[in-house]
Amino acid sequence: MPNSVGKRFKPTKYIPVSTAATLLVGSTTLFFVFTCPWLTKAISPGVPLYNGVVFLFVLANFSMATFMDPGVFPRAEEDEDKDDDFRAPLYKNVEIKGIQVRMKWCATCHFYRPPRCSHCSVCDNCVEDFDHHCPWVNNCIGRRNYRYFFLFLLSLSIHMVGVFSFGLLFVLHHMERLGTLHTTITLVVMCIAGLFFIPVMGLTGFHMVLVARGRTTNEQVTGKFRGGVNPFTQGCCGNIKYVLCAPLVPRYTGVDPRKKPPVSIQPPFIRPDISDRQISIKVSDNGIHTSILRSKSKISLDGLALDDKGLDTQPPLPPKADRYNQLKSQLTSSKGNSLTGKTHPSTPAMYKYRPSFGTIPKVHYNAAGEKIVMPDDHHKASAILEEGRCHVDYRSEPNLDLPDYHNAPLHRTFQSSPLQLDSYLINSRSLSLKQAHQRRDKGQLPTLQPETATSTPYKSVFSPNTLSNRNGSLSYDSLLNPSISPATEAECMAHPGMPFMGFHTPYLPTKMCHVRGPELQSQRQQVPPSFSPMLGSRGIGMSMSRQSPRDRDPSPVRYDNLSKTIMASIQERKEMEEKEKLLLHHGGHSQAQAYNQAQDSGMFDSPGGYGLPPSACYPDGPRGPSSKGPTPPAYGGSRDNLMGVVSYGPRTPVLRSSGGSSLVRAPRTSSSSLHTDSSMQGGRASEPSYRSPAHQPHHSPAMPQSPSYTHQKLSFIHALERTDSPRLGGPREAMMQSKVNGQTDCHLGPNSSSAQGNPLSPSRHSNVKKVTGVGGTTYEISV
Amino acid sequence: EISAPWTFHNLQELRHSASLANKVFLQRDYSDGTTCRFQTKFPSELESRIERPLFEDTVKRLNIYYAEAEKMGGQSYLEGCLACATAYLIFLCMETRYEKVLKKIGRYIQEQNEKIYAPRGLLITDPIERGMRVIEISIYEDRGSSGSCSGSSSTSGSSAR
């Protein structure tokens, strides 16, 4: 046996085909030699002619079936399967005419077998439209040669019938001389024909049915479409037509590269303009900031091959900010310019308070006091600025990316509420201090406290409001701590009331802080929860929810850059947020109620507001209102009250920023006090705070930390601020006095998340140094 | 041959100033059975390399060509009968309609490569080389400093081929 060096020569596989070929050719030849002459003479010359044609047909089809490539798929190159080889599922589903068809992964050929394709183990190839492997032709029957195989069967059947018939005729006519050579050979031929007649006819009939049904042998034998519908059928006539009249498909294997001239590839390469894409993405809606990020990151990645994270964190921010700014401006303009305006005025004021916070590093109450000094417009302006700053801060600090995101939503939600702006501003301030982590600790608080203190007092004042304005305060928080996205977020969320706080009388926060000091401290942990209701709800169900997850995601990245302390604070904040969430579900309402109590006006429908904090926060402006549906009205009232506390407006933001959560609560109480005693409301809350700087330290750690959240995005900060809710009264008062956006913020906070959103958006612009207040007022804040 | 900004004296030279970075595979669209169609979904990897309309236009055009090649009509029937009548000897001298369309597709792809894709650092591989299962698009990146003008003849294999 000849042994080829390459493939092993397997003679056994050639036995069937050899046998078949031998029998076919031999028998027919004998027939022609011995039988046809007499037939020609006896019947007509047409007999051999006819048989000759049929035999020729049989041979041609037999040859085609044997030597034609059935439709072998060339092996997939490595590049194609590098993704699939190890992790690819075994099957891939594809829908064909509405029917699910499974494509199996071929380990030998490294691709998913197209529909109707199967791997032939004899040929070791995947064959298109695999029918079967025919040993008689020693070839697979597939798409390309099925027609020839079928015709071969047909023609062979006809040929066999013809040979048998004419042989029989011959024999009948030569019965008397059966022993002669011609007769004997004819008899032999007849036997062969008769012997193979049954299998061949059977196979022919089988394939005729298959053709009519549009199935392959493989499908029929494996029962693929036994009970179902065959997606490949084209009807009986269509199937027959397909088999007989379809064009011959060229083979896939052995394809030469067409001898085409090579195409030269040289840089520089033309790149499509991607700016439009970015822009378009930016233009999308609220959720855009995420999408922007993605798109941008993608684009940046493609174009610049920058680090994803970096891109995601950094570049997206600016667009986001821009968008928020745009949104905010739109929102502010659309919503309640008055409101935003109120908030805006407060932000500047709050902004001014920043320094005051600095002066009272140790006690936020002191800061609150300072805040009081600068209520009114400053608050708003500062709040607004803070918002913007927060925005900016976030941008500038990669770590704050999270905050950004947080803020972004916060901004949106808070836009509606100036208080939110305040909180943001406060946050931003604290953030800018970048001692957020420090704030967390009491020691740190001093630095931050001024901010937080002021903010928290206000927050306390506006506690009721903050609750309701949780969203709003959040916005402020975001405003305050744009950089500290997570922190701010928490803060913003926590400080719905904060914004109000900002507007409250500075004294109030201290009072409230004082009163609540211990509470706040204890609540610090709670506060976050309280805020978290807002935050949590935000994150959970509200529009903010979007942000909260987002906030968290980037934060890990961002936080890497932060110092450990900051990271810790961020972690704390997160925990607080989670707690808040828990509380929200459980005690959020209770807190809200507390706030309600604090609020005489009940404007701050904090329960609802808090319940809605997320929504209130209005990650997108429009959402806020809806979410805050119930609350807005409440806030409206509160706002009015707050308006009276305009003076405290500036403070409110501060307060809010400081103690997000704490402020939230505080404001409620403070707000009520505010209402009752505009001057002392804040004082009520703030008095304690002022009175007892000692308390403040308690709170301030909590609250000032909120300022810290400016850069720490500490949820704790918010919490702290909330604890300072007593101070909210102050801020509220301030708000009322100043009638700044803070008021609107206050009541926007929880309620008008949208409103808050507006202020937020302006604050987002803050990085642009232009903050549009809740009421649509635009403040230019230099961050 | 593409006329490049730099003068090439050897048309067969393939300037490898770019290096193969990635390959994108456009899969078949089996929604309408086993007729040859390719998905027109725009791959994300090409987002920054080529404009979407250009890409979709190319793929749609290819789909039209393949549909034309596989069309079961009068011409394909006559071809079959003629082939049968001549015991398929006709295949030795004549080119089937499918083969003609495939050649047209090959020319179209070459033209697209020259005009649109190569300037963008892309190269489309004729699906027939992949068994009509995928359209392979090779993505090239600028190697940076390119001795593109160097006369070294790199194997043409135009990367895709």
Image: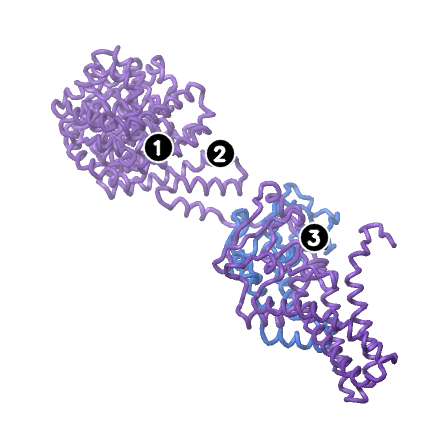
Total of numbered circles in the picture?
3
Which colour denotes chain B? blue
**Lateral position of residue A606 relative to residue A14, left or right:** left
Q: Residue A297's spot in the image, x, y percent?
A: 48, 39
Kind of residue sitting beneath label 3 = Ser
Task: Please give the residue where the numbered disc 3 appears in the rendered image.
Answer: A121
Q: Nearer the viewer, residue A681 or A229?
A: A229
- Residue drawn at 82 percent across, 81 percent down: A35
Query: Given this view, does label 3 or label 2 mark the residue nearer the observer?
Result: 3
Task: Please give the residue where the numbered disc 1 appears in the rendered image.
Answer: A407
Task: Please give the residue where the numbered disc 2 appears in the rendered image.
Answer: A309
Q: Chain of mark 2?
A: A
Q: Chain of mark 3?
A: A
**Lateral position of residue A679 relative to residue A470, left or right:** left
State the CA–CA distance, disc 2 to disc 1: 18 Å
Q: Residues within 10 Å of mark 2 (few under 14, many from 20)?
A: some
State the CA–CA distance, disc 3 to disc 1: 62 Å
Specify the chain shown as purple: A
The image quadrant of residue A255 is bottom right
* Element on which disc 2 rests: helix
Vertical position of residue A67 compared to residue A671: above or below: below
Q: Residues within 10 Å of mark 3 (few under 14, many from 20)?
A: few
Q: Chain of mark 1?
A: A
In the rendered structure, which disc, 2 or 1, sits on the residue that comes first in sequence? 2
Instruction: Residue at the far front: name it.
Output: A176
Residue A619 image label: none
Kind of residue sitting beneath label 2 = Lys
Q: Nearer the viewer, residue A318 or A464?
A: A464
* Element on which disc 3 rests: loop
* Quarter that holds the N terminus of chain B: bottom right
The answer to whether residue B14 is visible is yes
Labels 3 and 1 in the same subunit? yes
